[in-house]
Image (cartoon, helix red, strand yellow):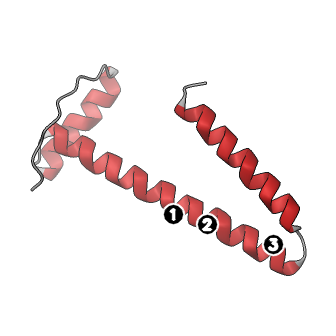
Amino acid sequence: MAVMEHRTTFALDDVTIQKMRHLAKRWNVSQAEVVRRAIEQADRLAEQEKTQILDRLIAYQQKGALSARQAQSYMEEVAENRAEWGRGE
């Protein structure tokens, strides 16, 4: 098990707290472990999504439905949108 070096505080709504406590009890783990698992899964899903988007763009290009310039433009737009999400805009 990893050594826990950081502590933090979160403000969560009642529904989220109830869900977290339910999962902790169901999985027989701490609430912190529930958060760690949720973050790990969210990270995996984000990577899968990125791969799926790239795979679709490649398929579109191979079919001639999307030019390399259009694909690059789309990927730049996606990157800009994600950067804005990270800043909470």
Cα distance between the residues tagged 2 and 3: 12 Å
Return the mark for residue 48. 1
Amino acid at pointer 1: Gln
- What residue do we see at 23% from left, 22% from top? 9
Cα distance between the residues tagged 1 and 2: 6 Å
Q: Secondary structure at mark 1?
A: helix
Q: Nearer the viewer, residue 48 or 86?
A: 86
Amino acid at pointer 2: Gln
- What residue do we see at 74% from left, 73% from top? 58
Residue 44 lies in quadrant: bottom left
Whether the residues at callouts 1 and 2 have beta carbons within 8 Å, the answer is yes
Q: Report x, y in % for residue 51.
A: 58, 66
Amino acid at pointer 3: Tyr
- Give the vertical position of 77 relative to 64 (above or below): above
Q: Secondary structure at mark 3?
A: helix
Report the quarter where the N terminus lies.
bottom left
